[in-house]
Image (cartoon, rainbow, N blue to C red):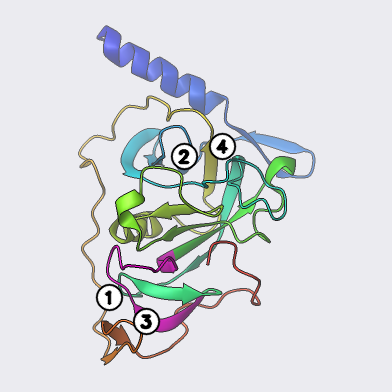
Amino acid sequence: MSPVLFRLGFFACLFLSAAFVRLDAGTETVVPPRVIISVKDQKLMVIEDGKRAAVYPVSTSKFGLGDRWGSMATPLGWLQVAEKIGDHAPPGAVFRKRRFTGEILPPNAPGRDPIVTRIIWLRGLESTNTNAFNRCIYIHGTPEEKIIGRPASYGCVRMCSKDVTEVYAQIQIGALVKIIPDSLPKLPKLKSSPNKVIFTAEAKAIPAVKSAATGQGATSRKRVSSAAKARASGDA
């Protein structure tokens, strides 16, 4: 084995063996995360079988790190995918309080900063991020794609619409997510995997209507996915 492969394997084993998460009262189990988000790198890594399946640029909070109410900060630590909202929604579909408004925005639409395309709602699993779900901390799409790659959100983890659609398709409800302050771990690349896992399945065509606000094509107003009772959105 070459020195480079040995080092990669060593760091991967070291990282994954340290991944302890409390899954229920009084029990700690070694479980690898499905997604790791690095605040330092402003990147999200999808992990498959302990290997790097894909890496995407993201934006975490411009208000720093934390879980205090009203802080608009991004929480650290172990979280879990609690809900997925936006099945079959077109890219740029605008959500308010987790409901599709009927409006569709193109990337970098001027003067607009809503949640778009997909919502992956996270629930904290540690005392340091216990407020994450009620604070509405999501991984979600944003029209402000030109500033992805640097802290810019109000607590959530923002992604380009194309990227968040791919991540949404790769992870299931209950998947573990870890947000770390440091750089992404050096994991070996998943064999026979492109740099990004591409999903080509398209949503069925939906009759479009004209958006009064932007003049862009938009679908008729409908709820895309069921969610919990409406709460004040943390990044909408």
- Residue linked to disc 2: 36
**Quarter the N terminus occupies:** top left
Q: Residue furthest top?
A: 3
Q: Does label 1 or label 4 sit earlier along the sequence?
A: 4
- Residue linked to disc 3: 103
Q: CA distance from mark 4 to mark 3?
A: 40 Å
Callout 4 touching callout 3 (CB < 8 Å): no
Dot 4 falls on a residue whose secondary structure is: loop
Is residue 173 shown above or below 8?
below
Residue 233 in percent (x, y) is at 59, 68
- Residue linked to disc 4: 31
- The amino acid type of the residue labelled 3 equals Glu
The residue sitting at 39% across, 37% down in the picture is 49
Q: Does label 3 or label 1 sit earlier along the sequence?
A: 3
Q: CA distance from mark 2 to mark 1?
A: 27 Å
| Apparent side of residue 173 relative to residue 28 in the rendered image (left or right) | left
The residue sitting at 65% across, 35% down in the picture is 29
Q: Nearer the viewer, mark 4 or mark 2?
A: 2
Local crowd at mark 2 within 10 Å, few (<14), some, or many (≥20)? many
Residue 69 in percent (x, y) is at 72, 54
Local crowd at mark 3 within 10 Å, few (<14), some, or many (≥20)? many
Does the stretch in magenta take in 116? yes
Q: CA distance from mark 2 to mark 3?
A: 31 Å
Is residue 107 shown above or below 187?
below
Does the stretch in magenta take in 23? no
Q: CA distance from mark 4 to mark 2?
A: 13 Å
- Residue linked to disc 1: 203
- The amino acid type of the residue labelled 1 equals Ala
- The magenta region covers 99-118
